[in-house]
Amino acid sequence: MTRANFPRWLLVPAVLGALLVAVPIGAMALTVDWANFGALITSEASRAALWLSLRTAAASTVFCLLLGIPLALVLARTSGTAATLLRSLVLLPLVLPPVVGGIALLQAFGRRGILGHTLDVLGLEIAFSTTAVVIAQTFVAMPFLVLSLEGALRAAGTRYEDVAATLGAGPTTVFTRVTLPLALPGLVSGTILAFARCLGEFGATITFAGSLQGTTRTLPLEIYLQREGDPRAAVALSLVLVAVAVLVIGFTRARPGSLSAGTS
Amino acid sequence: MKTQTIRYAVRSSIALTGLLALAACGGSDSGDATGSGANSTATQSNSSSAPARTLTVFAAASLQKPFEEIGDAFEKAHPGVTVKFSFGGSSGLVAQLQEGAPAHVLATANEATMDKAVADSLISGTPTPFVSNTLQIVVPQDNPAGITGLADLTKSGTKVVLCAPAVPCGAASTSVEKSAGIDIKPVSEEQSVTDVLGKVRSGEADAGLVYVTDVAGAGTEVKGIDFPEAKSAINIYPIAALKSATDAALATEFVSAITGADGQAVLREAGFAAP
């Protein structure tokens, strides 16, 4: 913003673009019932939803890391048709409507899904449980981590890894001591993005996990339900999610270059 | 298709211009500025297309099949008239009308929701009750949990899905539970009756409470089980012409088509009972 080295007329659509986001968010902040704000967001149902959201999003983020870090490494260090196909597959939830993801999860893990019988034998009941929420969130959020980390790994290159290997470090030591620290900014921003996506998950959860207070009704589901019963509570809770989102963006912004590492 | 896309493009640019105007004057009357902009394009495009008339009906989701059939017959009987429907949850429809959505007729799934529209002076005249609907237990065709009556829904290990108490079908479920003196512990409280039906249809749930008409429209994948306690929660559906209707006579005619013999026959076919 220091020098205007762009055509001035571009300012008009740029301002419009910014307003498209700012006006609705601002309107929500203006219409919220501030006098009862505290009561609205601390009702039993609201607290249960917020607590469930935080717990499930944290658990899902851990699963995203456990599965997503190896995936990102494999994708960053391989090439060819197979790698391209694998990348397209892993990124699919990013472009799929979440409802479609929920339906797909039902076909796999649902009671009558292809794995349903096996899970039943093992005594695992996934439908309508908090586990289902975590699976749904991991499904939709993992691509954010993989995309971000793979970019960082590719940007870091393999030079230091090669040097460490010639100095006698084993593959696992190289991975934990060289590869991951080098890609840390991408890993951090990917983790934050994945956590934020988990918090906002709605479509796959309501399709796959159902909606029950304290078990599967996360904050977005509670907001959607409150729209019918108490619209003021829906607006107040929405503002809470906006505040969380602002915090998340703040975290990412606090690390300069961390986002660009993921997208380069 | 192409003109439709252009129309959307025009409408959204007008809404965006509203945003810009708002930015320029920094006023707080945002809703009015953008809202009137969008409305004026709507009327423009209508008048430019033909002398044809359009009737917009807002109706509860459960009315979709019979209303579309009655709408087709209405179009045939009134050359030049196009009937457009917006089906959805009754509360959501009333909320849209409160925000100024243009429509001619409103039909809701219960009287409480229509009362909200009446209280907001959206309705012209008094609403007419035209059908009623009761709850039924819905189970997958093979009835895996062996449900025979309402009391079976409280058996432990039975996965029951209900509507959330905040939505009309959930309120009905709650009063049925009260009158039967039982407390069902659902595994999920869904947003709408179609979501409950979906969970039972896919076999995820063993049973649910939905309307008789939902079971009738769902085909052979599910079956309905009547239960005597359903009488304690009969939903009356009212219909009314809206004050904002641009063509009041046509709106009244449509209401008559629904309450008349032919319309009622279609609704009976779909499983609805007399009000």
Image (tube, grey):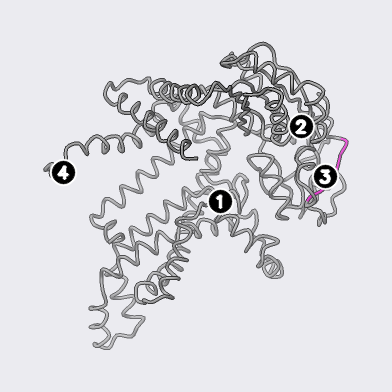
SS class, disc 1: helix
Q: Which residue is denoted by mark 4 in the rendering?
A: A6
Q: Tag 1: Cα neighbours inside 10 Å, few (<14), some, or many (≥20)?
A: some
Question: Chain under label 1?
Answer: A
Vertical order, A143 against A71 (above or below): above
SS class, disc 4: loop
Could you give the CA–CA distance between mark 3 and mark 2, rounded to whole angstroms?
19 Å
SS class, disc 2: helix
SS class, disc 3: strand
Marks 3 & 4, CB-CB < 8 Å contact: no
Q: Which residue is denoted by mark 2 in the rendering?
A: B175
* Closer to viewer: mark 3 or mark 2: 3
Q: Tag 3: Cα neighbours inside 10 Å, few (<14), some, or many (≥20)?
A: many
User: Which residue does the image show at 33% across and 28% down from the upper left?
Assistant: B17
Q: Quadrant of the C terminus of chain B?
A: top right
Q: Which residue is denoted by mark 1 in the rendering?
A: A99
Marks 4 & 2, CB-CB < 8 Å contact: no
| Range of magenta residues | B222-228
Q: Is residue B270 rendered magenta in the image?
A: no
Q: Amino acid at mark 4?
A: Phe
Could you give the CA–CA distance between mark 3 and mark 4, rounded to whole angstroms?
66 Å
Marks 3 & 2, CB-CB < 8 Å contact: no
Q: Position of residue A66 (x, y in %)?
A: 45, 68
User: Which residue does the image show at 30% across and 52% down from the upper left?
Assistant: A252
Q: Which residue is denoted by mark 3 in the rendering?
A: B224
Q: Are marks 3 and 1 on the same chain?
A: no
Could you give the CA–CA distance between mark 2 and mark 1, rounded to whole angstroms?
31 Å
